[in-house]
Amino acid sequence: MTTLVVTRAGPLTTVQDLGRRGFAHLGVPQSGVADRASAATANRLVGNHARAAVLEVTMGGLAAVAEGTVTVAVTGARCPVTVAGTPVGHASTVVVPDGALIEVGTAVSGLRAYLAVRGGIDVPPVLASRSTDTLSGIGPDVLAAGARLPIGTDTVGWPSETIAFGDVGSGGADVVVLHAVAGPRDDALRDRGSLVTGDWLVDPHSDRVGVRLNRDPDRQDPPVELLPGRDELQSEGVALGSVQIPPSGQPVLFLADHPVTGGYPVVAVLTADSTDRAAQLVPGQRVRLRS
């Protein structure tokens, strides 16, 4: 069996696919890849089904040895990638010979890189998905050195290109603009325009559950305030990309491992493209929300 053997896992590397849908009524989050467009690009480049499991590499730092020849692509965050010590292209189809070491270096732009292998990462599914859910602990373990990852054989036809131009996860803008539509509780805001006025900074405590935003202390941007009595609700369902406002007034942008319910107002919901962009935000990065 063809296998990838992890020799260095970096800060956080997990197995992810499109997630486990249809279990929210049981309290099980969807999980899955945080940047869906980048993962889909990686799978297309190696001729996989869109549902194939990939490796989500946060901040880079992954190294693995191929046991058997494999075909890979790395998309998303811009990370230097080498095969047997030779640099290879970002968002391009690369053959890794038997016994060669593939390394995904530290990200220089963006946060999450996606390593797809032709045939998919074939770990056992849990509740119809191979995704690691960092909130509930469902799915494969977070990867560590020594992990052996079997490679599957379920593929589709080869793509017409072997390089993806304009890979969605590769942008490095000084200010990232995220677009949102009104949420079910947008009337809980004292000033509905405050959320989309001025800039926000990405908090270091952000993770796969959500991106936390803070106001820049050096600017005079208006605070986001909730109307009296609207800071807590009976728990209700929350969707991927929801913008939730806790009593602190510091927005949380829900990502892949978000809970299925919440008790704070959801005042906006990011568009699909902007949810993918939010998954690539790094701590300290400047963000603007637009409706």
Image (cartoon, grey):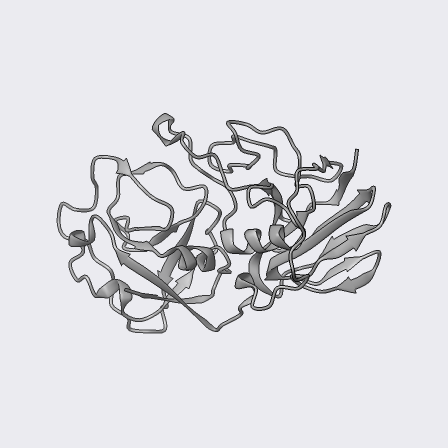
Quarter of the rendering occupied by the N terminus: top right
- Residue drawn at point x = 31 percent, y = 42 percent: 238
Q: Is there any visible trace of residue 58 in the rendered image?
A: no
Depth check: 18 or 47 in front? 47
Q: Residue furthest right?
A: 99
Q: Is residue 262 above or below residue 96?
A: above
Find residue 241 and report its horizontal and vertical position in percent.
37, 50
* Nearer to us in this view, 233 or 186: 186
**Residue visible at 43% across and 35% down?**
21
* Residue 171 drawn at (x, y percent): 53, 68
- 133 vs 53, left or right, is left
- Res. 137 in view: yes
Q: Position of residue 141 (x, y in %)?
A: 61, 33
The reply, left or right, for residue 92 in relation to residue 52 is right
The quarter holding residue 2 reads: top right
Q: Residue furthest left?
A: 228
At horizontal 36% and vertical 52% (from top left) the residue drawn is: 252
Q: Residue at x 84, y 56 (%)?
A: 84
Percent x, y of residue 254: 39, 48
